[in-house]
Image (cartoon, helix red, strand yellow):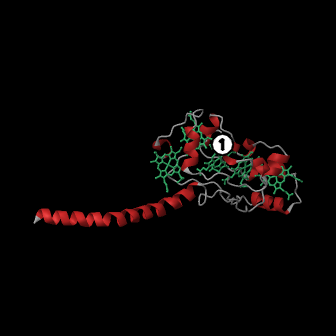
């Protein structure tokens, strides 16, 4: 009984094997393909450039008026996150500069009421990833390597996909000699 049963089920398995394999292949393709397109940027917010509550223009401030990134983002060399400047930083200039502009009047109003401006966040990693600005700047990676030519952007735009592949590819470059074990970025 037993050997016959085995042979029969063996035969059934063989007959099933080909359609099963092609099903598996199909299933894995449908799983892998979207993952591939995601890796090249779609869905990771590359190109994201939301409208902001006040039309702050990096190209004007950095490009035309040569204000350093760290004049405003003044915590970036010391901390994990790069701060968005407080309105008091803006008012260092805008108490005098362009005071007739409706945008600056909006700014002054928010400042005087002690309200912040609700800037729309552009770059955002998932919570399970740890990233540290100060550590990268200390190794001489500059802002533009990761954020693009900000000094030409009238509205800030995310230029990379912020995918794991993007991080790991740079870490792998021999000149960077940066860690690629999982716990470096996932704690
Ligand atoms: C005069 C102040 C000022 C200067 C100088 C400045 N920034 Fe900003 N930055 C801001 C403000 C305000 C925002 C938030 C509004 C916005 O996104 O435009 C911002 C937003 C950003 C963001 C997007 C933050 C997010 O939500 O993901 C990046 C990236 C950035 N700045 C990089 C730079 C770089 C790089 C430089 C120098 C080349 C620079 N900034 C110079 C004020 C400044
Ligand atoms: C090695 C790549 C890299 C470099 C170099 C870098 N950034 Fe970023 N930046 C990122 C990533 C990734 C995020 C998103 C971080 C998150 O969501 O936790 C980010 C986010 C930001 C933000 C939003 C606030 C925050 O911290 O989430 C600002 C503002 C910013 N960067 C400004 C700068 C400035 C200014 C410089 C240069 C002084 C700089 N960055 C250099 C990768 C980089
Ligand atoms: C170091 C000086 C300085 C700082 C700090 C500064 N700005 Fe400006 N800003 C300028 C100058 C200069 C102009 C150009 C004025 C002109 O063309 O008449 C300008 C122009 C502007 C304009 C366009 C005004 C218009 O309608 O023509 C806006 C909006 C603005 N700034 C917002 C901000 C915000 C928001 C901050 C803080 C995050 C800030 N600025 C910080 C110097 C500064
Ligand atoms: C342009 C190249 C580049 C990119 C892009 C980059 N890194 Fe790095 N990263 C480095 C270098 C260089 C070091 C420093 C290695 C060393 O300490 O010698 C580093 C170090 C680190 C460290 C260890 C430093 C510490 O102690 O905090 C972490 C964590 C890290 N990176 C996370 C990330 C993540 C997450 C991303 C993507 C969102 C990323 N990196 C993108 C170049 C890069
Ligand atoms: C240099 C930083 C870095 C290293 C090293 C790294 N990761 Fe990631 N990982 C990321 C970033 C950034 C994301 C979020 C973006 C994404 O999903 O591509 C991520 C996302 C993930 C996700 C979630 C994917 C999803 O669909 O949500 C998993 C799972 C993961 N990583 C596993 C690993 C494993 C396993 C290792 C070690 C072999 C590793 N990572 C090493 C940066 C890193």
Secondary structure under badge 1? loop
Q: Nearer the viewer, residue 153 or 99?
A: 153
| Percent position of residue 88, x then y | 75, 50
Q: Give the answer, above or below, for where 182 lies relative to 121.
A: above
| Percent position of residue 184, x then y | 49, 41
Q: Nearer the viewer, residue 137 or 172?
A: 172
Q: Give the answer, above or below, for where 187 lies relative to 156.
A: above
Q: Residue furthest left?
A: 1
Q: Is the residue indicated by label 1 positioned so its CB lies within 8 Å of ligand 2?
A: yes
Residue at image point 57% right, 43% down: 169
Quickly name the residue at label 1: 76
- For the question of whether residue 74 can be seen, the reply is no
Q: Is residue 29 left or right of residue 68?
A: left
Q: Nearer the viewer, residue 112 or 136?
A: 136
Residue at image point 54% right, 54% down: 126
Q: Nearer the viewer, residue 39 or 6?
A: 6
Q: Is residue 23 left or right of residue 137?
A: left
Residue at image point 32% right, 63% down: 17
Q: Quadrant of ligand 4?
A: top right
């Amino acid at each position: 009984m037993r050997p016959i049963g085995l042979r029969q089920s063996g035969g059934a398995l063989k007959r099933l094997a080909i359609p099963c394999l092609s099903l598996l292949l199909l299933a894995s393709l449908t799983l892998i393909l979207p993952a591939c397109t995601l890796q090249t940027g779609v869905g990771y917010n590359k190109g994201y450039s939301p409208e902001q509550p006040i039309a702050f223009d990096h190209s004007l401030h950095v490009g035309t008026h040569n204000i350093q990134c760290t004049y405003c983002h003044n915590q970036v060399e010391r901390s994990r996150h790069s701060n968005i400047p407080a309105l008091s930083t803006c008012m260092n200039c805008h108490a005098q500069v362009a005071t007739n502009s409706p945008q600056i009047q909006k700014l002054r109003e928010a400042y005087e009421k002690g309200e912040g401006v609700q800037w729309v966040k552009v770059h955002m990693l998932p919570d399970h990833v740890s990233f540290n600005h100060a550590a990268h700047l200390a190794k001489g990676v500059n802002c533009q390597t990761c954020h693009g030519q900000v000094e030409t952007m009238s509205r800030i735009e995310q230029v990379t996909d912020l995918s794991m592949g993007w991080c790991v590819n740079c870490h792998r470059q021999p000149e960077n000699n940066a860690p690629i074990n999982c716990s470096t970025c996932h704690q």
